[in-house]
Image (spheres, grey):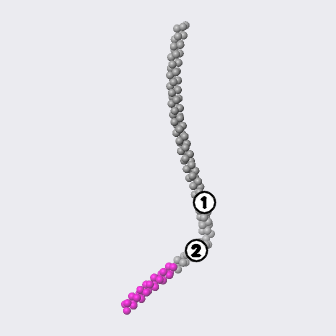
Amino acid sequence: MQEWQERIEAEQRETNRRLTDVERKQQTEQIKVIVERQVEESPLLQTIYTDVGHMKADIGMLKGDVSTLKTDMSTLKEDIGTIKTIQNGHSKYFEEHGKRLAHIEAVQIEQGSMLKEQGELLKQILDKLQ
């Protein structure tokens, strides 16, 4: 008797489990049908889907623009490197030119001193001649 009772209880548990599974599946199916209806019937949702589609296209275009900008930036960086190289060459030229100007200035100062001395000598000579 106890064996039958255990067997009946086991079968009842199995039946309850199956019933619960069936109820879950039915609820899931109902939810799925409701969601599908809402998607089909919702103009706002359709508008959102349309807008998302347009945004995806815009993003594709923006990716192309970014790629172009990257290429342009790479070219600009190369051009800046070339300009820096040229400026370094000019810098050396200006250093040499500065040295020449400093030398010319030193010579002019020296010649100015010599002219001053010669002027004083001439003045002394003229004073003695008078």
Q: What range of the chain is rendered magenta? A: 1-25
Is disc 2 surrounded by few (<14), some (14 to 19) or many (20+) residues within 10 Å? few
Q: Amino acid at mark 1?
A: Asp
Q: What residue is drawn where x is 51% and y is 13%?
A: 121
The residue under label 2 is 36
Identify the image quadrant of the N terminus.
Answer: bottom left
| Spot occupied by residue 49 in the image (x, y as percentages of width and height) | 60, 67
Query: Of callouts 2 and 1, which one flags the residue occurring earlier in the amino acid sequence?
Result: 2
Residue at 57 percent across and 52 percent down: it is 71
Q: Nearer the viewer, residue 81 or 121?
A: 81
Q: Are marks 2 and 1 in contact (CB under 8 Å)?
A: no
Does any portion of residue 97 appear in the rendered image? yes
Hey, which residue is sitting farthest bottom in the picture?
1
Amino acid on which disc 2 is placed:
Glu
The picture places residue 111, in percent across and down from the top left corner, at: 52, 21
Vertical side of 105 occupied by 126: above or below: above
At numbered mark 1, what does the secondary structure look like: helix, strand or loop? helix
Instruction: Count residues near mark 1 (Cα–Cα under 10 Å), then give few for <14, some for 14-19, many for 20+.
Output: few
The residue identified by callout 1 is 58
State the residue in front, 97 or 30: 97
Which mark is in front, 2 or 1? 1
Q: For marks 2 and 1, give the CA distance.
A: 28 Å
Q: Vertically, is 25 above or below 111?
A: below
Residue 75, compared with residue 114, is above or below; it is: below
Q: Residue at x 54, y 7 (%)?
A: 129
- Seen from the viewer's position, the closer of residues 46 and 102 is 102
Q: Residue 130 falls in which quadrant of the image?
A: top right
Count of numbered tags: 2
Q: Position of residue 91 (x, y in %)?
A: 52, 37
Q: Secondary structure at mark 2?
A: helix
| Horizontal and vertical percent position of residue 114 | 51, 19
Q: Residue at image x 54%, y 40%? A: 86
